Amino acid sequence: AALPAGWRRWVAGAAVVALSLTTQITMWETSVLTESPALSLLALVVAAVLRLERGFTRGRVLGVLGATLAWAAVRDSHATVVLMAAVVVAVWFAVQRSRPWRRPAVLLLGLLAIGGAVTLSAAHGHRDAQPIEHVLAVRVLPYPERRAWFAQHGMPLAGGLGELAPIVEPGLAPYVAVPPAPEYAAWRRWIRAHGRSTLIRWTLTHPTFAWTETFRTPERVFNNGQGQLDMYLPQDFRAIPLASRPWHHATWWVVTVALGLVAVLVARGTWRSPLALTGALLVLTAAPHAAIVWHSDGMESARHLVVPGTQLRIGVVLLFAAALRPVFRAQHAAPAP
């Protein structure tokens, strides 16, 4: 609907439908996991943002906030994207100071409240405790120098944890499975109280960790099905022929296409359209979203990265749709006699 009536709407709509029918999206519909509602609500948020960029009305602002609240409630990592979107709104608000400020201000405050509430809720409920245990199991405990650093910064039972033999499987990263035994209760209490802050401190004092760790081979995760999603396919799943092709392209290829589309939009002077701005926002926030998702857990990274990966591809589809938009040139009337 953001495009002029005609063939462009049909082409753009077909691109959206093609993405929605990919196996990597439809495969979650019969699973009792967060992927299905997360993907559906992501599409709802994008649609609400597209409507908002065509004009700040009260209903559209509330629509964006309502969709964002539902999406952020599904997964704690979504709060990262919400807070990044709040920064974008704040910058836009600062640049457009001459425009009416109330509704953009409500949007900004609403996004900050949603992102902050989800983050505080996760911290209060210690929902990060088990994912952090997974991170330590595969990225800290198998390595003596890292284990020693965490011991120096308060991690208890480092000696006993060092005696646990890492589980090594061919082609996979080693990891230490800490038994659910009473003698390790102090370690798990420390994770609940100080695990996240200590892990953040480690990352800040080892600045290359956040970047280089993601490129280790084999990937430092476990229970990940060789990095493929096939382990999650329902047994009776029937894929639509050729429907998975839009997803299977490597991320670097998708990013290259996104950069090419941005170059086209800038050259044509149509980069300020709602489609282009929304698509660019999705593409730009996909990388930090994926990085935070990957660093927040040490297992099942292939599944956890489905939402950031879909976010990136939705952004590319919107940039493609924006490139279909015709260039409107001002028609100068003939001078009056």
Image (cartoon, rainbow, N blue to C red):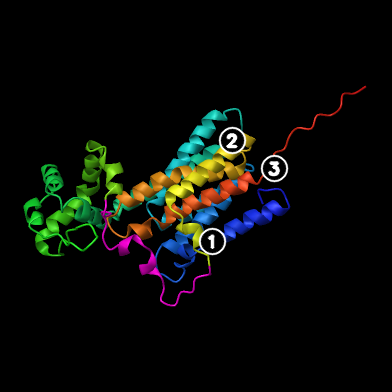
Magenta span: 217-241
Along the line of sight, which residue is nearer the eye, 163 or 188? 163
Task: Answer whether labels 1 and 3 touch (C-beta < 8 Å).
Answer: no
Q: Earlier in the sequence, mark 1 or mark 3?
A: 1
Residue 70 or residue 208, whichever sits in front: 208
Residue at x 20%, y 47% (from the top left corner): 194
| Separation of residues labelled 1 and 3 (CA atoms) | 25 Å
Q: Label 1 to label 2, Cα distance in Å?
A: 28 Å
> Is residue 163 covered in magenta?
no
170 horizontally vs 282: left or right: left
Q: Position of residue 291 (x, y in %)?
A: 35, 47
Q: Residue sitting at 48 percent across and 58 percent down?
A: 247
Residue under the point 38% across and 67% down: 230
> To which residue does mark 1 refer?
20
Assess whether mark 3 and mark 2 are in contact (beta carbons under 8 angstroms): no
Question: Is 92 above or below relative to 308?
Answer: above
Q: Is residue 78 left or right of residue 319?
A: left
Residue 249's spot in the image, x, y percent? 46, 55
Mark closer to the chain start, 1 or 2 = 1
Q: Closer to us: mark 1 or mark 2?
A: 2
| Label 1 residue SS | helix
Give the number of the disc on residue 114: none
User: Tag count in the figure?
Assistant: 3
Q: Which residue is mark 3?
A: 326
User: Circle 2 sits on which residue?
Assistant: 266
Which of the image's four quarters has the C terminus?
A: top right
**Mainly helix, strand or loop, the magenta region?**
loop
Between disc 1 and disc 3, the foreground one is 3
Whichever of labels 2 and 3 marks the residue nearer the N terminus, that label is: 2
Element at badge 3? loop
Crowd around label 2: few <14 · some 14–19 · many ≥20 (10 Å): some
Name, please, the residue furthest toward the right: 337
